[in-house]
Image (spheres, helix red, strand yellow):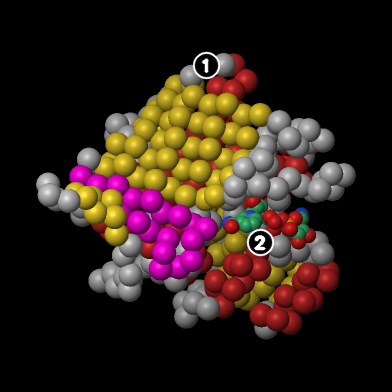
Amino acid sequence: MNVAVIGLGAGRGHLRGYSESQDARVLAIADIDERRLASNAEQFHIPQVYKDYKEMLKVPEIEAVSVCLPNDLHASVSIDVLNAGKHVLVEKPMARSAAEAEAMVAAAAVNRKTVAVSMNYRWAFGLEPHYLKHLITQGTLGSIYYVKTISLRRYTFPRGYTTWFSVKARSGGGGLIDMGPHMLDLAMWLAGDFSPIQVSGVTRTAIMTDTDVDDLASGLIRMKGGATILMESTWATFTRSAMSVTVFGTQGGAILDLNAPQGQRLTLFSEDGSARFETTPMDIRLSEQPDASVQEHFVRSIRAGRQPENAGECGLAVMRVIDAIYQSSATGRDVVIEGE
Ligand SMILES: NC(=O)c1ccc[n+]([C@@H]2O[C@H](COP(=O)([O-])OP(=O)(O)OC[C@H]3O[C@@H](n4cnc5c(N)ncnc54)[C@H](O)[C@@H]3O)[C@@H](O)[C@H]2O)c1
């Protein structure tokens, strides 16, 4: 499949993912930064470069486009791509708000194209996340009633240094909208439930006081299927950095530590009536091998005529939770997510 990438910061990860896949060929890249265009075209042997992405969208051979731009451009550019009759893989967060994400899902439906969100954490940490998902799906952990995710950053941005990331009007928020999508997506994916119904949340700008974005976010999310998700996401804290998902099942539990080296990321907890077990699965071989990257999954799903597992509806569910955490924090009340 002929693909293109707009935005060459995180977009370089997409260039890598596509170029390592047998199923994709990067035909074109677009960026307003000419140096980034030239260096990436050379490194990845890309035949066409564009300063104006709208010119690139006129190329009929391009079937799908990764949108890797600052958050304030995700919705408008993705909708341009969908209206040009091409599929979209957009970086996380899907947009700055659920309303923008809804418009993207609607544009995909009208144009009969796919919009997927680059929830690369499902694929980027080796086989351990997929093995855990497999155990949960086959019932080994029993019923999943609670999932706790943390994403804590020790350091702060240097004072006086701001990018679009720390300007709320451009990014939509701070630690919550930046790291929250990865962790909420992992939690909902593992719980097998993308229908949040009620959210209580708190956000603070406690340390990064030279910005208008949150450096702490905490949310308690009740899911339609009965599970509860607890999430903490920070951009700056005086504590240890950490990134993990803890799964509580009625027959067993698991900790997925994304900061641990490959092979040591997953710990499983169980008991057999006589003893308690704490095990680290090694040398994982799944009968169904997951795709190598989110880019490969996106391209293969489209080629097979399937909805990708990271379809826009998942990104929209994440954005509904993020909106609700900000709203709950502002009002001091729980937020009920309608229509779920
Ligand atoms: N999935 C991940 O692990 C991950 C990691 C990092 C960033 N991201 C996401 O990727 C997105 C981009 O972040 P980044 O760190 O690459 O930002 P960045 O600012 O480093 O890069 C953005 C790029 O977009 C280009 N650009 C800006 N406006 C443009 C326009 N109108 N037309 C064409 N090009 C334009 C810029 O020149 C720049 O090269 C964000 O949404 C971010 O949240 C995801």
Which residue lies at the image location 49% right of the left edge and 57% below the top edge?
258
Residue drawn 66% across and 80% down? 44
Q: On the rendered structure, is 271 left or right of 302?
A: left
What residue does disc 2 label? 10
Local SS, label 2: loop
Disc marking residue 67: none
Quick one: label 1, few (<14), some, or many (20+) residues within 10 Å? Answer: some
Numbered disc 1: secondary structure? loop
Depth check, mark 2 against mark 1: the one in front is 1
Query: What amino acid is labelled 2 in the image?
Result: Ala
Labels 2 & 1 near each other (Cβ < 8 A): no
Give, as a three-letter code, the residue at label 1.
Arg
Q: Is residue 52 left or right of residue 322?
A: right
The quarter of the picture showing ligand 1: bottom right
With respect to residue 88, does 179 lie above or below? above
* Beta carbon of the mark 1 residue lies under 8 A of ligand 1: no
Q: Is residue 248 visible?
A: yes
Q: CA distance from mark 2 to mark 1?
A: 36 Å
**For residue 333, which numbered disc appears in the image?**
1
260 w.r.t. 196: above or below? below
Image coords of residue 46 (percent x, y)? 68, 79
Residue 157 horizontal/vertical position (percent)? 76, 47
Report the residue at 70% width, 81% height from top: 43
Ligand 1 has an atom within 8 Å of the beta carbon of the residue at disc 2: yes
In which quadrant of the rendered image does the C terminus lie? Answer: top left
| Residue range highlighted in magenta | 251-268
Residue 284 at x, y = what percent? 31, 70
Q: Nearer the viewer, residue 60 or 188?
A: 188
